[in-house]
Image (cartoon, rainbow, N blue to C red):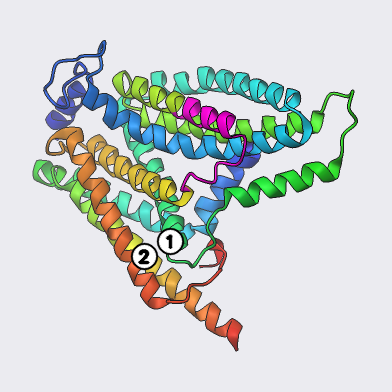
């Protein structure tokens, strides 16, 4: 067993490109490795960015753009400081296999929560999380508070700061979790999150309305399945298992989660054909 | 930020507590199997964990469906 663990530990430091046996093409990262690690981080981060962008848009449209943009920049700087201190410390101090095991367990726990809620929403048991509803609620609350023209809009600043910081913390967690293997994985996860941020912000800026066209529950469904899959994959790897085809077995695990979830949706629809509007915490 | 972390923890351990406990038990069984089962067991722990988690998800959702049905029918009465 010790022998096997030593082998796995040494494999964790293999050069980029080991997953598929292909030669690295983009710097040190081959495209398959980049896609495997960047896509989940991209999709998961996009969900968080959609929520933050919706709130910043609501503030900007009703109260002007200066305060929410300053709030967004302030939150981004705060996040950068948090990631630079906590994130780097965690990745450098904790042993790699232990970190994989802990992060794998956390990903599985968080992923199961997302997946459960997404399945309940698809089955019509829990109300679908509606970005349009959030946008209209934010608009109504902000309009009710009023604003005097020449003052700096601290309410707008704080609402945007809070939203970007909260959702950004989740993005930071996603990047650290998906990049826990270090090196290539961390680079790919960061690239995925940055790309998601740019994509969602560009979409929001172009449309200047809530991002209701993004099918949020589908995203959460997919992200839940991916988080669970990475959780299972890393936890087993931390225990010394060598998955067949290494990271290429991840799509298989994702497919297993999607099939089980689809079966669960059908089962729930059979149990409650007319659906129900129950809060998730009550079922 | 702390409020966000707190609400996540509450959601994870209280709202979805049974699912979280089930997942932790599955992780513990997997760890015990890998520690006690030798090299052969180590090479299948991932599949065992996957099977346990999939069964857990389906069982938890079935229970959620039954609970929701009971709530709906009691609300109609």
Which residue is depicted at the point 47% across and 32% down? Answer: A173
In the picture as drawn, the residue positioned furthest to the front comes out as A207
In depth, the one of A274 and A246 nearer the eye is A274
- Would you say residue B62 is visible in this rendering? yes
- Label ID, residue A256: none
Question: Which residues, given as a range, are shown in magenta?
Answer: A196-215
In the picture as drawn, the residue positioned furthest to the top comes out as A27
Q: Secondary structure at mark 1?
A: helix
Residue B50 location in percent, x, y?
25, 52
In the rendered structure, which disc, 1 or 2, sits on the residue that comes first in sequence?
1
Which residue is depicted at the point 34% across and 39% down? Answer: A104
- Taking A26 as reference, is A130 above or below it? below
Which residue is depicted at the point 66% across and 45% down? Answer: A135
In depth, the one of A223 and A110 nearer the eye is A223
In this rendering, position of residue A50 left or right of residue A271? right
Number of labelled discs? Answer: 2
- Label ID, residue A265: 2
Disc 1 from disc 2: Cα separation:
7 Å
Q: What chain letter is assigned to the residue under label 2?
A: A
Which residue is depicted at the point 28% across and 59% down? Answer: A260
Q: Which residue lies under the disc numbered 1? A: A122
In this rendering, position of residue B71 left or right of residue A97? right
Q: What chain letter is assigned to the residue under label 1?
A: A
- Would you say residue B56 is visible in this rendering? no
Q: The N terminus of chain A appears in which quarter of the rendering?
A: top left
């Amino acid at each position: 067993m010790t022998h096997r663990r030593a082998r796995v530990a040494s494999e964790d430091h293999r050069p980029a490109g080991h997953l598929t046996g292909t030669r690295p093409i983009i710097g040190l990262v081959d495209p398959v490795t980049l896609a495997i690690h960047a896509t989940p981080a991209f999709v998961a981060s996009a969900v968080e960015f959609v929520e933050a962008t919706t709130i910043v848009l609501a503030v900007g449209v009703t109260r002007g753009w200066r305060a929410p943009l300053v709030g967004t920049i302030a939150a981004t700087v705060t996040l950068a400081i948090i990631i630079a201190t906590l994130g780097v410390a965690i990745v450098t101090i904790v042993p790699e296999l232990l970190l994989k095991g802990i992060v794998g367990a956390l990903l599985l726990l968080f992923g199961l929560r997302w997946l459960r809620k997404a399945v309940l929403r698809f089955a019509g048991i829990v109300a679908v999380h509606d970005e349009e509803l959030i946008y209209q609620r934010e608009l109504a609350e902000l309009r009710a508070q009023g604003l005097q023209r020449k003052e700096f809009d601290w309410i707008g600043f704080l609402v945007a700061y809070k939203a970007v910081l909260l959702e950004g913390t989740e993005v930071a967690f996603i990047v650290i979790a998906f990049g826990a293997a270090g090196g290539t994985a961390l680079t790919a996860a960061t690239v995925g999150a940055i790309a998601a941020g740019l994509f969602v912000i560009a979409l929001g800026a172009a449309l200047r309305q809530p991002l209701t066209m993004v099918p949020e529950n589908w995203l959460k469904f997919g992200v839940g399945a991916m988080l669970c899959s990475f959780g299972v994959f890393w936890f087993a790897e931390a225990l010394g298992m060598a998955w067949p085809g290494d990271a290429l077995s991840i799509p298989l695990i994702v497919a297993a989660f999607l099939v089980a979830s689809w079966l669960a949706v059908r089962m729930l629809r059979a149990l409650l054909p007319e659906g129900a509007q129950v809060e998730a915490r009550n079922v | 930020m702390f409020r966000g972390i707190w609400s996540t923890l509450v959601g994870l351990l209280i709202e979805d507590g049974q699912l979280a406990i089930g997942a932790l038990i599955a992780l513990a069984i997997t760890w015990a199997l890998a520690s006690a089962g030798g090299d052969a067991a180590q090479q299948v722990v991932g599949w065992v964990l996957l099977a346990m988690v999939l069964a857990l998800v389906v069982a938890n959702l079935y229970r959620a469906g039954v609970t929701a049905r009971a709530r709906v029918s009691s609300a109609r009465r």
